[in-house]
Image: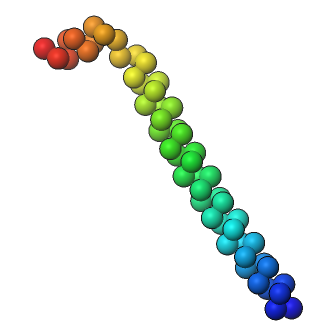
């Protein structure tokens, strides 16, 4: 019984950490993708105009 409880607790901890890391990875990738899409529409002319 004791081993079963330890295994269940360990499994829950590992799954929780895994889900958290996947969530963080998704947030980071979404931010990078969104920034990349925004930057793509930024032309050289816009850069020159903003630097004036």
Residue 45 percent across, percent down from the top left: 27, 8
Question: x%, y% of residue 38?
Answer: 41, 24
Extreme-bottom residue of the structure? 2
Q: Quadrant of residue 41?
A: top left
Q: Is residue 20 above or below residue 38?
A: below
Q: Split into 4 quadrants, where in the image is the N terminus?
A: bottom right
Q: Is residue 19 left or right of residue 6?
A: left
Question: Quadrant location of residue 39?
Answer: top left
In the current view of this chain or complex, which residue is farthest to the right? Answer: 1
Name the residue: 47% across, 38% down.
31
Residue drawn at x 70%, y 65% is 15
Report the residue at 78% width, 78% height from top.
Answer: 8
From the viewer's perspective, is 39 left or right of 26? left
- The answer to whether residue 8 is left or right of residue 21 is right
For the image, the number of numbered tags is: 0
Q: Among all residues in the image, which is located at the extreme left? A: 52
Quarter that holds the C terminus? top left
Q: Identify the residue at image location x=20%, y=12%.
A: 49
Please determine whether, in this image, residue 9 is positioned above or below residue 42: below
Where is residue 18? Give x, y as percent.
66, 60
- Say how the picture is coloured: rainbow
């Amino acid at each position: 019984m004791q081993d079963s409880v330890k295994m269940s607790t360990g499994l829950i901890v590992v799954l929780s950490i895994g889900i958290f890391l996947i969530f963080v990875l998704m947030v980071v990738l979404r931010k990078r993708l969104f920034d990349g899409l925004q930057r793509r529409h930024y032309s050289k002319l816009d850069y020159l105009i903003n630097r004036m």
